[in-house]
Image (cartoon, grey):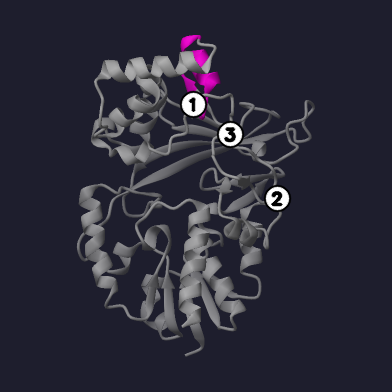
């Protein structure tokens, strides 16, 4: 065997594990079926703009260990995520804060806003939220739920809000201040030069083969290494033996516009049900220093984002962690016990929604346990 570890997937989990293994003196081969590294955080240069090919990615964390780790491979800018909601031409601040409440109800003080939310929660008769709709109304009231949550969420998940679990929206930021920072995270930013450059630095000195479908060449690739770190879909690994797990997928329509500014913000969510896309990303605003009045880039790049039910051939994005799929995942998880030389990790390998910092933390934790042994 030529390698200690064969790592399937050159995204954040795979790159993080590979880096730790290499630094521990292990031999490593990374393969990815895509023609590029960095997985879903891949960025490419278009008209001098770092385009987030697979959707907006803002790194945010309260974990100093993770922040220090990623700063080994990139310098981060001071980007603050402050999305805007567009409801039929009306613009509101996201996260939900005093700007939102003032625009919605004409209130001026935090006391007025809190009273308005409480009155609407009481009027809805909600004590223990049983689904996403009830959870949202209990957090922000009926008016904001109807205009800014319901349509967007139903487009995103392809299901009625009454049929979605409450936990999906529990981390929704609601503030009785004028703070426009969406993430309640101490550390936040985007790598200067883009995520692809950061992941390339993580993989420096490590052999990487792109355009290689592991499952199509499993036997010959497995024969190259003592152990496999698999970050692909867990159900695909087992040939969909128990049936496919469900995901939500995302499709992007990206275009270059011959103007310096399309919407004046990195992210605008379209929260009405009728607009087919969930949000529009204007990539240049992720880069610090691009918002001067004259603007040094005469063009801009935007991506319209459409949510859809996953089907074979699509890229799986968000696990549908309802009871049915969770039970199905447990069946696959039980099968992993038989795969003594395979580590299943990451968003697809564990059928779990991870923020980027959580992926890095999971890779560091797993590599520490594995390499200590």
Categorize mark 1 by other alpha carbons within 10 Å: few (<14), some (14-19), many (20+): many
| Region in magenta | 86-106
Q: What SS does tag 2 mark?
A: loop
Name which of mark 2 and mark 1 comes first in the sequence. 1
Left or right of 350: which side holds 109? right
Q: What SS does tag 3 mark?
A: loop
Categorize mark 3 by other alpha carbons within 10 Å: few (<14), some (14-19), many (20+): some
- Residue bearing mark 2: 192
Residue closest to the eye, 360 or 220: 360
Q: Answer above or below: position of 192 versus 91.
A: below
Residue depicted at x 75% and y 37%: 289
Name which of mark 2 and mark 3 comes first in the sequence. 3
Structural distance between the alpha carbons of marks 1 and 3: 10 Å
Question: Would residue 367 be counted in the magenta stretch?
Answer: no
Question: Residue 295: image x %, image y %?
Answer: 77, 31
Structural distance between the alpha carbons of marks 2 and 1: 29 Å
Left or right of 98: which side holds 219? left
Question: Residue 283: image x %, image y %?
Answer: 62, 39
Q: Answer above or below: position of 27 versus 14.
A: below
Name, please, the residue furthest toward the front.
111
- Residue bearing mark 1: 96
């Amino acid at each position: 065997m030529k390698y200690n570890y064969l790592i399937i997937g050159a995204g954040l989990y795979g790159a993080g594990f590979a880096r730790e293994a290499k630094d521990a003196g292990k031999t490593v081969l990374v393969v990815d079926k895509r023609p590029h590294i960095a997985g879903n955080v891949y960025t490419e240069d278009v008209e001098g703009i770092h385009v987030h090919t697979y959707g907006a990615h803002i790194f945010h964390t309260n974990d100093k260990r993770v922040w220090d780790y990623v700063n080994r491979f990139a310098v981060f800018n001071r980007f603050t995520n402050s999305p805007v909601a567009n409801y039929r031409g009306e613009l509101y601040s996201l996260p939900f804060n005093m700007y939102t409440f003032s625009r919605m109800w004409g209130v001026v003080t935090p006391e007025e806003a809190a009273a308005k939310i409480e009155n609407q929660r009481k009027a809805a008769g909600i004590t223990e939220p049983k689904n996403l709709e009830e959870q949202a109304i209990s957090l922000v009231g009926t008016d904001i739920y109807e205009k800014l949550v319901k349509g967007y969420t139903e487009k995103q998940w392809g299901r009625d809000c009454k049929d979605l679990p409450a936990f999906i929206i529990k981390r929704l930021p609601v503030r009785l201040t004028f703070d426009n920072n969406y993430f309640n995270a101490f550390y936040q930013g985007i790598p200067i030069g883009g995520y692809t450059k950061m992941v390339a630095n993580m993989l420096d000195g490590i052999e990487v083969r792109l355009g290689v479908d592991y499952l199509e060449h499993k036997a010959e690739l497995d024969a190259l290494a003592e152990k496999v770190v698999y970050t692909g879909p867990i159900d695909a690994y087992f040939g969909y033996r128990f049936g496919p797990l469900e995901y939500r997928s995302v499709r992007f329509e990206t275009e270059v516009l011959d103007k310096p500014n399309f919407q004046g913000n990195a992210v605008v969510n379209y929260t009405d049900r009728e607009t087919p896309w969930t949000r529009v990303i204007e990539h240049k605003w992720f880069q610090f220093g691009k918002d001067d009045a004259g603007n040094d880039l005469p063009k801009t790049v935007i991506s319209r984002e459409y949510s859809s039910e996953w089907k074979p051939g699509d890229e799986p994005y968000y696990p549908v962690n309802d009871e049915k799929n969770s039970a199905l995942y447990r069946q696959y998880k039980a099968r992993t016990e038989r795969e003594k030389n395979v580590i299943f990790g990451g968003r697809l390998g564990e059928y779990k929604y991870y923020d980027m910092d959580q992926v890095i933390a999971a890779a560091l934790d797993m590599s520490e346990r594995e390499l200590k042994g």
